[in-house]
Amino acid sequence: MTSPWTYHGGRLDTARLHYGSDLDWIDLSTGINPTPWPVERAGPIDWASLPDEAARTDLEARASRYFGVEAAHVCALPGTEIGLRMLADMLPGAARYATPCYRTHGDIYPAGRPVSLGEGAAEKGEILLLANPNNPDGRLLTPAQLDAILAQAEAADGWLVIDEAFADVHPGFSLTDRIGEGRRLLIFRSFGKFFGLAGVRLGFLLGPSEIVTRFRTRLGNWPVSAAALAIGRAAYADAAWIDAARTTIYAQAATLDAVLRRHGLEPIGACPLFRLVACADVAALFDRLARAAILTRPFADQPHWLRFGLPKDAAALDRLDRALADG
């Protein structure tokens, strides 16, 4: 299935134009927490002044405590997407990227090789890019598995780059505590997915200080907006909300799983922020849901897959249940 919605999630404007702009749409096309962190807790934001350097330093310090690394190994980004697209310039060389994967991963190194994990030994100086948890199939590698991959990369003087955009819901599976000088490991972390604030455009690079410095130099002055600085600083310090959000997300995923299974759709993967299913006629299912003003995520290279984000509330879940039954 090839359509405007197979490139990435979140194209609700295109869906409105195609299926109807007056409908009350439910966007399940992304893996973003449908219950965002309450931005009013960030307090007033100074929109008239340039972003404060001390606030950026404080944000990176708070984020570093949350990630479990030293602040010298953390660089704030105006969204992980931009950081990933800078990667080939910051870390040039031969590359592989684990598939299936984000569309962006295949774009970063145009001459890179798509590979299945475990497919062959790392070549000299090669960069391996993977996501954990993975998108779109929700594959989750254990720290022991990742340590083995990292050891292989370091033995070949290569690099392991992990996109941990969804790792907030699996903190025990993150490799952030392996970051340090002399390690050939880079990690990207997203803010918007777990905290439900994708529009803030905030992310982080974690790595050896030399690479962090390269990114900071390339990004220049004021790379992160005043709003992102204020919201990020407050959100990463909100431990009670973080703990409650993890519990809620897992409960929402379990409820969604029950609805999908009731309609013969078996969830695939371990990431609770989205659920992937396989079915024979994805195009028809996608179209049927879209005509009910529910946007999901199909994939051009995997025409039998359809991904569902978490419905925001019981009303949204009930609408999905009824639309799935109306076949």
Image (tube, grey):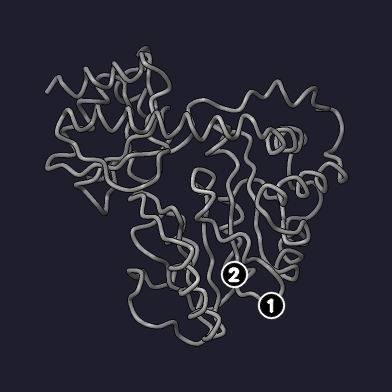
Q: Amino acid at mark 2?
A: Leu
Res 298 → quadrant:
top left
* Left or right: where 204 falls relative to 261: right
Q: Amino acid at mark 1?
A: Gly
* Left or right: where 23 falls relative to 63: left
Depicted 304 relative to depicted 293: above or below = below
**Residue 227 percent coordinates (x, y):** 73, 32
User: Where does the N terminus fall, quadrant-wise?
Assistant: top left
Say which residue appears at 35% left-offset and 18% top-offset. 316
Say which residue appears at 73% left-offset and 43% top-offset. 224
Res 3 → quadrant:
top left
In-front residue for pair 250/131: 250
Depicted 237 relative to depicted 301: above or below = above
Res 261 → quadrant:
top left
Q: Residues within 10 Å of mark 1 (few under 14, many from 20)?
A: few
**Residue 214 percent coordinates (x, y):** 73, 66
> Which residue in the structure is indicated by mark 2?
185
Verify CB contact (< 8 Å) between mark 1 and mark 2.
no
In-front residue for pair 11/66: 66
* Left or right: where 38 falls relative to 31: right
Q: Residues within 10 Å of mark 2 (few under 14, many from 20)?
A: many
**Residue 225 percent coordinates (x, y):** 74, 38
Say which residue appears at 65% left-offset and 66% top-offset. 179
Count of marks, rendered view: 2
> Which residue in the structure is indicated by mark 1?
182
**Residue 306 percent coordinates (x, y):** 26, 40
Q: Secondary structure at mark 2?
A: strand
In-front residue for pair 250/303: 250
User: Where does the C terminus fall, quadrant-wise?
Assistant: top left
Say which residue appears at 55% left-offset and 29% top-offset. 244
Instruction: Please tell me the numbered disc located at residue 69.
Output: none
